[in-house]
Image (cartoon, rainbow, N blue to C red):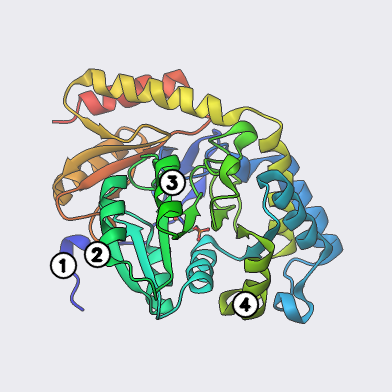
C-alpha cells in the first residue's frame, strides 16, 4: 500500500520536562502537553510509582507467563476484586492493553453468525475485534439512536445474535453517548451492548465510576483502560459471571498473552484509590468548560464535543499540520489528528484538558491561537 507523502508519520521522542505538564523534545524545547490522556497526571504520582516499585520487588517486574500458566499474582486478584466492587459487576478480567481487551470483548460476544451494529466513530480496536470475530458489521450514525433503531429493525433477523457497540466519551470527538436511549433500544430489540469506557473512567460519575456505573444490569460488558486517567497501562473487561466464565475459558487474547505486569497492576490499584477519594473528574470538566468558552471567544475556531477532549476542527490536513507547527513554535504540543484516524476533511487539533493546566497556560494558548494566520 502506497502512503501519500503528507500522511507519513514520524515517531518523535519525548523526555519529561521539569513542569508537571511539560514535555521536552529532541531540540531541547519545553512544550506544554495538551495531548496526552494522562488526565490527572498520575503517570508521575510518587505514591503510585512507589506502589509499582514495591510490588515489583515482591512479585517480580514481569509476570513471566500467561494467567493460566504461572502469571497470576495476588495483585491481579486484588485489582480484579476492587474493580468488581467499584463498578458493580460480578466479573473483571485484566488485559495488557485496551486494544487487546477490546478485541477480546468483541470476540467473546459474537461470532461469524452474529450481527454487530456499531457507532460510526468507534475506536479502531473494536473494529479490529469485529473483523477477527467474522461477524457482519453495520454502522449507525454517530450518537444517533434513531438511526440505531432503524438499522436494528432493518438488519436484524431472529436467527442472528446482535451486539451494539458504543463508546461513552468518544476519543476523537469528546462527545457523550446517549446511553439511556441506547439501552432502551437494545432492550426492545433484544440486542446486547458493549460500551468502551476508556475516556469516561475517572472523569464521569460519582468517584469517577464512568458513564455506565448505574446501568450494569443493562450493559453486557464494559471495557476500560489504565492507559488514560489511571496514568499507567493495562486494561480490563467487566461483565456478568456467566459471560466472564465463558471468556476466561475461550478468549485467546486473554489466554495466550503474558499477564499484565505486577507493577502496572499495583499502579492501577493505587490509582484507583486516589481516583475514588478525589473529585478530579468534576475539576477537569469545569476546566474544560472554561477552555472551551475561551477558545470560542476568539471567534474563528469551531470546537467539537463537550467534555475534556476538545477538537478544534480545521478540515484540511495540511492546514491542520500548519496549525500544529505554529502551536509548537509557541510552546504547545497539540497534535493534528488526520485521516485515516478521522474522515477526510475532518482533520483537527485534538486537545486534552488535564488537571495540571493552569489559567496562565490557558491565557498563553489563547494568544497562540489568536496569532495564527
Ligand atoms: C476509546 C479507546 N478504546 C481503547 C483504546 C486502547 O487502549 P490502550 O491504549 O490501553 O490500548 C483507546 C486508546 O487509544 C481508546 O481511545
Label 3 close to label 1 by CB (< 8 Å): no
Residue 144 showing in the rendered view: no
> Can you say whether 283 is above or below 119 in the image?
above
Label 1 close to label 2 by CB (< 8 Å): yes
- From mark 4 to mark 3, how far is it between C-alphas? 36 Å
Callout 2 environment at 10 Å: few (<14), some (14 to 19), or many (20+)?
few
N-terminal label among 2 and 4 = 2
Nearer to us of marks 3 and 1 is 3
Q: Which residue lies at the image location 40% right of the left edge and 81% below the top edge? A: 112
- From mark 3 to mark 1, how far is it between C-alphas? 44 Å
Q: Which residue lies at the image location 70% right of the left edge and 50% below the top edge? A: 83
N-terminal label among 3 and 1 = 1
The residue pinned by badge 3 equals 184
- Residue 27 is situated, as x and y percent measured from the top left of the image, at 38, 48
The residue pinned by badge 4 equals 257
- From mark 2 to mark 4, how far is it between C-alphas? 31 Å
- Disc sitting over residue 8 in the figure: 2
Q: Which residue lies at the image location 81% right of the left edge and 57% below the top edge? A: 55
Callout 4 environment at 10 Å: few (<14), some (14 to 19), or many (20+)?
some
N-terminal label among 4 and 3 = 3
- Disc sitting over residue 4 in the figure: 1
In the image, taking residue 166 as reference, residue 345 lies left or right, namely: left
Q: Secondary structure at mark 1?
A: loop
Label 2 close to label 4 by CB (< 8 Å): no
Badge 2 residue CB within 8 Å of ligand 1 = no
> Can you say whether 307 is above or below 316 in the image?
above
Q: Secondary structure at mark 2?
A: loop
Nearer to us of marks 4 and 3 is 3
Amino acid at each position: 500500500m502506497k502512503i501519500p507523502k503528507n500522511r507519513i508519520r514520524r515517531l518523535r521522542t519525548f523526555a519529561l520536562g521539569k513542569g508537571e505538564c511539560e514535555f521536552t523534545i529532541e531540540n531541547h524545547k519545553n512544550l506544554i502537553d495538551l495531548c496526552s490522556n494522562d488526565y490527572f497526571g498520575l503517570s508521575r504520582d510518587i505514591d503510585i510509582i512507589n506502589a509499582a516499585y514495591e510490588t515489583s520487588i515482591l512479585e517480580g517486574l514481569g509476570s513471566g507467563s500467561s494467567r493460566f500458566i504461572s502469571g497470576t499474582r495476588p495483585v491481579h486478584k486484588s485489582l480484579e476484586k476492587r474493580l468488581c466492587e467499584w463498578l458493580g459487576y460480578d466479573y473483571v478480567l485484566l488485559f495488557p492493553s485496551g486494544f487487546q481487551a477490546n478485541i477480546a470483548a468483541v470476540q467473546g460476544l459474537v461470532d461469524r453468525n452474529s450481527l454487530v451494529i456499531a457507532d460510526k466513530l468507534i475506536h479502531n480496536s473494536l473494529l479490529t475485534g469485529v473483523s477477527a470475530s467474522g461477524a457482519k458489521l453495520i454502522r449507525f450514525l454517530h450518537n444517533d439512536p434513531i438511526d440505531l433503531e432503524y438499522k436494528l429493525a432493518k438488519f436484524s433477523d431472529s436467527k442472528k445474535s446482535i451486539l451494539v457497540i458504543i463508546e461513552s466519551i468518544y476519543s476523537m470527538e469528546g462527545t457523550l453517548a446517549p446511553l439511556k436511549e441506547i439501552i432502551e433500544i437494545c432492550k426492545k430489540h433484544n440486542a446486547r451492548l458493549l460500551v468502551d469506557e476508556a475516556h469516561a473512567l475517572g472523569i464521569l460519575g460519582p468517584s469517577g465510576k464512568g458513564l455506565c456505573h448505574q446501568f450494569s444490569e443493562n450493559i453486557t460488558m464494559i471495557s476500560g483502560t489504565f492507559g488514560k486517567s489511571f496514568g499507567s497501562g493495562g486494561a480490563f473487561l467487566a461483565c456478568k459471571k456467566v459471560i466472564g466464565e465463558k471468556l476466561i475459558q475461550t478468549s485467546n487474547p486473554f489466554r495466550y498473552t503474558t499477564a499484565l505486569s505486577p507493577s502496572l497492576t499495583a499502579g492501577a490499584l493505587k490509582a484507583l484509590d486516589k481516583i475514588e477519594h478525589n473529585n478530579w473528574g468534576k475539576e477537569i470538566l469545569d476546566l474544560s468548560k472554561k477552555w472551551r468558552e475561551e477558545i470560542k471567544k476568539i471567534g474563528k475556531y469551531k470546537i467539537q464535543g463537550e467534555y475534556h477532549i476538545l477538537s478544534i476542527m480545521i478540515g484540511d490536513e495540511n492546514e491542520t499540520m500548519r496549525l500544529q507547527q505554529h502551536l509548537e513554535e509557541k510552546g504547545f504540543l497539540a497534535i493534528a489528528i488526520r485521516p485515516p484516524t478521522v474522515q477526510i476533511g475532518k482533520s483537527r487539533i485534538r486537545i486534552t484538558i488535564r488537571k495540571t493546566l493552569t489559567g496562565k497556560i490557558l491565557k498563553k494558548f489563547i494568544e497562540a491561537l489568536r496569532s495564527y494566520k
